[in-house]
Amino acid sequence: MRKRSRTVALTILGAASFAIAGCRDEQVQAEAFPDLATCEAQAKSEGLFTVDQCAEAFAQAETLHVESAPRYDSLAVCEEQHGVGNCGSEQDQVSNGGSGSIFMPLLAGYLIGSMLGNAGRGMAAAQPMYNNGRGGFTNATRTSNFNSNSGRGTLNSQQFTRPARTMGQAPMSRAQATSRSGFGSRSGSRVGG
Amino acid sequence: MQKVTLPERPNWRETAEEVGFTFADMHGEPYWDESSAYQFSLAEVENDIEDPSTELHAMCREAVEHILSSDALIARMGIPEAYHDLVADSWRRNEPEIYGRFDLAYDGNGPAKLLEYNADTPTSLYESASFQWQWLEDQLAAGVLPGGADQFNGIHEALIERFRGLFDPNTDLHFTAIGGNTEDYATVEAMGWAAREAGMGAHYTDLEKIGVTKDGQFVDDQDRIIGTLFKLYPWEDLLREDYARHIAGSGALFLEPAWKALVSNKGLLPVLWQMFEGHPNLLPAFFADDVADALVAGQKPVPAVAASFDRAADAIRAGHVVKPLFSREGASISIVENGDVTETSPNNDYDDHPKIVQALATLPDFDGFHPIIGSWVVGGTCVGMGLREDRARITQDLSRFKPHFIID
């Protein structure tokens, strides 16, 4: 009797492969900009996006920032998550009705996806970016980290899922803000053997 | 069993590159090495590796039952006391095992000897199940291996069957490992790929991106609830981390289940020896605390193991290996022969852990390399093998993976 499998396909390894091999998530061209002016300057040379699209996406990122930026119950907790000097009160960042005792990271850039214009079904064409306090950038839900707030790449369309609303919700305490990374702290240890 | 020199596939490096097997060379040393391969007879594989490994797995399950019947024994296994119930409950609920890898010393003569059981986070799954298989198919096609040559490697198909047997079609399963480790990721992906072929939804998330909801459920990096989590991360570490307190209430099924913490644990080795002393596939083993006085100071072992230690004393004194309860990649292991430390691993990450001593197995020597057989168990059955060899007698993370084939 044969002792080996009949077929074993060669698999593609790498961070994206679960998406590639599986329920194939759509890939989109995306570009990050630190601010609107950079996007507009790029649009005039060789950007993926036009000046109008820059403005439209920037407005959308600003809206999402107001609605869905991570909110913290103190400046200290916010700065722990996003770095010193990268936070401000809701009152200062939201045009009307913001609280002086809720703190949000400052908008540090935005990410535009090429589905701009036909984004729907809970999707947004642009996403706000924030300093992650470790030299990189993160998104509103703090689930993705980016090495930079300028650059181009192919991203999973999931990156453009509309983030959950945080406006009007209770801000995060320190315990809640740090409620990720509860596993993996012993990553110095090795698996396998 | 013999080692034979064979021509390498001319394009294997490109193939490895294409499929993302990017650690075929690690730290500038070859990890995948097909300049030679190990040849076995079918009888060697079936009688000396396959059947004994299946039997050893059943014995390990008996040992779990035995350990859980004794508070004193659980305490010796290095599981934090707060989580003894978590481990015991996972066993009582019959939470299923997916896979494990025995490391065996075997030279083609006499019974294979169990060195340890990587039952919780075995890696090298991808190179064993897939890349090694492709090597055989390519070498058969190229005429390098004669028609009829086979390989003990039903790992991939067995994993598919295992997932199919355990879960309803389209069940969402999550897979996780520490982000950024290519080698771990390859094992997780090979596993996820088998699950997907079994009709499951497979989702990957980096371990450190897992979160907890207000209701205590685990969520992935996109805030999807985790119902079943395959984690390539050792239980002994999980149980010492902040989120350990959420596991019991999370409603998530962990794979491997928590009871594997007792199996992928060098403390299993003395337990097995006490239960099955003299079994042909076992080496004498003792908890170091029980026999240290006898070994080092010429005094007596603790009474509970005195008789069995006496029976094994000559073998242990001639040569034994000191291993921490938990160690990976050969870390913090030393070999003692006739009272002298003759080999010790450069990595001492686990030096402060409790230890066991195990009689030294003679490792075969092929061209200056010591091969160790990894026999893969899926569910409760041995379904394949892979070999790694090292110049040193303590196999470390720079050892080389060697393909094998069967010719009768």
Image (cartoon, helix red, strand yellow):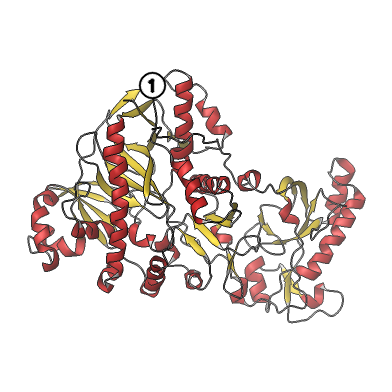
Q: Determine the residue located farthest toward the top in the rendered image.
A: B143
Q: Is residue B401 visible?
A: yes
Q: Is residue A40 left or right of residue B390?
A: right
Chain ID, mark 1 = B
Looking at the image, which is closer to me, B91 or B266? B91
Residue depicted at x 27% and y 54%: B323
Looking at the image, which is closer to me, A48 or B8? B8
Residue depicted at x 67% and y 49%: A23
Q: Is residue B331 visible?
A: no
Residue B353, position in %: x, y?
30, 62
Q: Determine the residue located farthest toward the right in the rendered image.
A: A52
Q: Is residue B82 left or right of residue B351?
A: right
Q: Quadrant of the N terminus of chain A?
A: top left
Residue B308, position in %: x, y?
12, 59
Residue B324, position in %: x, y?
29, 57
Q: Which residue is mark 1?
A: B6
Question: Dot 1, how many residues are within 10 Å of its Cα: few (below 14), some (14-19), or many (20+)?
Answer: few
Residue depicted at x 33% and y 29%: B38
Q: Amino acid type of disc 1?
A: Leu
Looking at the image, which is closer to me, B270 or B42? B42
Could you say whether the residue bearing mark 1 is in a helix, strand or loop? Answer: loop
The image shows residue B330, relative to residue B96, as above or below, that is: above
The image shows residue B367, relative to residue B327, as above or below, that is: above
